[in-house]
Structure formats: structure tokens, C-alpha cells
Amino acid sequence: MDFELDYLKDEKNGDWEISTVEISENFAKLRNLFENNPDMLIVPGKYKRLTYKKDVIMSNTQMERRTHYTAIKKAKGNVLVAGLGLGMFIYNIMNKPEVKSITVIENSKEVIEMVGKYFKDCEKIKIINEDIFNYKSNIKFDFAFFDIWKDISFDNIKDFEILDEKFKKIPVKFFWSKSFLV
Ligand SMILES: C[S@@+](CC[C@H](N)C(=O)[O-])C[C@H]1O[C@@H](n2cnc3c(N)ncnc32)[C@H](O)[C@@H]1O
């Protein structure tokens, strides 16, 4: 797996921005003082970050990498992905021989403009500008990864339930952060 996201250039598009941030040792130490969960510890280094109106939507810190790991390993067949973000998930599954197709549903056209261009040569990938709660398809998906949330919050649970019901025909589904909450 490769979580460095070296393909991404820093860029702004409307209220959205991809930027590179450096987390210093001192900042990481201070931040980690208040963290009891080892999975959430911050490691000093350079990271890529996606923000909306300066609010962090995602980054490629170790915590985010861990939350993608199992879904990357399990993805196979026709894959549905909700949330393009920085493309970290699709970058890590697009060359898996057992992944036949990847359909990405992303509701921000700005995110698609910034990130979609890095995947345009991959014939397996189709990116659709749509809200996942409205998306309908005749494709027989084998696997789905839902990653539309910016925080690990109990408020996400109602979305998990709605999406689980809406996509009940998909045999294997992963919801980002669900293992921390339920
Ligand atoms: C945390 S990021 C996704 C990270 C991505 N899976 C990756 O690997 O880089 C969340 C993304 O979901 C998108 N999003 C949020 N709500 C959505 C919705 N209802 N339907 C589709 N996309 C949504 C956001 O615009 C954002 O790009």
C-alpha cells in the first residue's frame, strides 16, 4: 500500500483546497498528550490535506491510513466508493487484479476537478458527480466503501443505517469509522 499521495499537487478550487502541511515533533508531542487511543496518535512528518472553507475534511495521517487498511485489503469485483476525497482509497485498489471496476460517487464537482484528473487514464475507474444518498444504479456491486464523513462522530450512525438499507444488495460493505463507534 502507498499512502504518500505523491501524485497530488497543492491546489485551490473555490472553497476547496489541497495543501501540504508539516507536523512538527513539538506539535505532535503536545497533541498526543491529550490522546489515550494509540490508533489516534499523530506522527511528525509531511501530510496532504483536503479542506473545505479551511475545515479539514481528510488528510493522509497514520490514523486515516489505518481506517482504510482493511477495506483496501478486502476490496474486490465491482466496487462502489462514496467520497473521492484525495483519492487515497482508489489509488490503493485500482491495480488490484481482483478489482474489476470502481465507481466513485462524489458530491463536490470541485473535488472531482482537482483529484479526478489523476485517475483519468485508469479504465477501471468511473467518477460520478452525485450525492450518494440519491445515487441509483443497475450495476451489481460486490463491495462498497462509504467514506463521506470528516469526523468520527455518533451522528454518523444514522447515515450508516440509511446507506446500509439503501445498498442492502451489496454483499460486503465498509463504513469509514464504524468500528470506532458501533
Ligand atoms: C473523507 S473524504 C473521502 C476520502 C477518500 N475516501 C480517500 O480515500 O481519499 C470525504 C469525501 O466525501 C465527499 N462527500 C461528502 N458527502 C457526500 C455525499 N453525500 N455524497 C457523495 N460524496 C460526499 C466529500 O466531498 C469528500 O470528498
Image: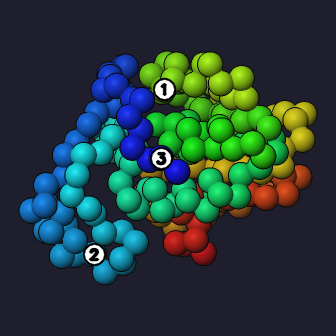
- The quadrant the C terminus occupies is bottom right
Give the left or right position of residue 3, taking residue 139 as reference: left
Please tell me which residue is depicted at 72% across the width and 36% down the height of the picture.
102
Indicate which disc residue 142 carries. none
Indicate which disc residue 115 carries. 1
Q: CA distance from mark 3 to mark 1?
A: 17 Å
Circle 1: is it few (<14), some (14-19), or many (20+) Cα within 10 Å? many
Please provide percent x and percent y for residue 143. Answer: 77, 51
Name the amino acid, label 1: Val
Give the left or right position of residue 72, taking residue 44 as reference: right
- Give the camera-side residue of 168 and 99: 99
Rendered-image quarter of ligand 1:
top right
Mark 1 beta carbon near ligand 1 (under 8 Å): yes
Indicate which disc residue 35 carries. 2
Q: Can residue 70 be seen by looking at this rendering?
A: yes
Residue behind mark 3? 2
- Give the camera-side residue of 154 and 139: 139
Q: Secondary structure at mark 3?
A: loop
Compared to 138, does 182 lie above or below?
Answer: below
